[in-house]
Image: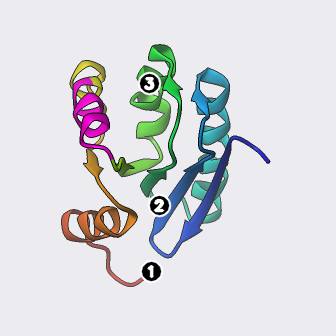
Amino acid sequence: MTAVTVSQDGPFTLVDLKNGTLVDMRVELSIYRQRLTLFNMNRQRKQLAIYVGRICGLDFTAARYACGEDFEQITEAKVLVLESILNRTFANIMLTLNKPQFPVYVCGSLEQAKACLQEKHPRGEQ
């Protein structure tokens, strides 16, 4: 099994990280390539991305890349699904440091993530 699987779920691009994955540049580049493939298959419409999975760590360089120009070109908004309040707090600190070039939200469940994106980034019929 690969460390990450990217799929389309209606208007959402789901990034499913295998539990225990260390997210480094190799993993971020894999995420980018998979998301770019979906982006090109879906008429280059910017994605509403939802990231799920319990990672074991995040490399600072990879975190900065994930907030940068390459991802900005394919991302309308992104949600990190983090069940732990401590992880959500840490994520908000990292987002402040990395200054993403697109909106990033932190939610406690997949259902909350979908509701958040539908509310803040509504889409008409495709």
Q: Secondary structure at mark 3?
A: helix
Disc 1 marks which amino acid?
Answer: Gln
Q: Secondary structure at mark 2?
A: loop
Q: Earlier in the sequence, mark 1 or mark 3?
A: 3
**Of the numbered discs in the image, which one, if any, rests on residue 45?**
2
Asked if residue 44 lies in the magenta stretch, the reply is no
Give 57 or 49, whichever is nearer the viewer. 57
Whichever of labels 3 and 2 marks the residue nearer the N terminus, that label is 2
Q: Are marks 1 and 2 in contact (CB under 8 Å)?
A: yes
For the record, the magenta segment spans 84-93
Badge 1 crowding class, 10 Å Cα cut-off, few under 14, some 14 to 19, many 20 or more, is few
Q: Nearer the viewer, residue 33 or 21?
A: 21
The amino acid pointed to by label 2 is: Arg
Indicate left or right for 54 with 41 as reference. left
Q: Residue 63: which disc?
A: 3
Q: Can you say whether 41 is above or below 78 in the image? A: below
**99 lies above or below 51:** above
Q: Residue at x 51, y 60 (%)?
A: 13
Residue, x 22% and y 33% (percent of image)?
89
Q: What's the amino acid at mark 3?
A: Ala
Q: Reading the chain from its start, which is encountered first: label 1 or label 2?
A: 2
Q: Which of the two discs, 3 and 2, sits closer to the camera? A: 3
User: What residue did someone put label 1 on?
Assistant: 126
Q: Which mark is residue 101?
A: none
Q: Residue at x 44, y 80 (%)?
A: 126
Residue 84, image x, y percentages: 31, 44
Please identify the dominant SS of the magenta region.
Answer: helix
Give the label, 1 or 3, closer to the camera: 3
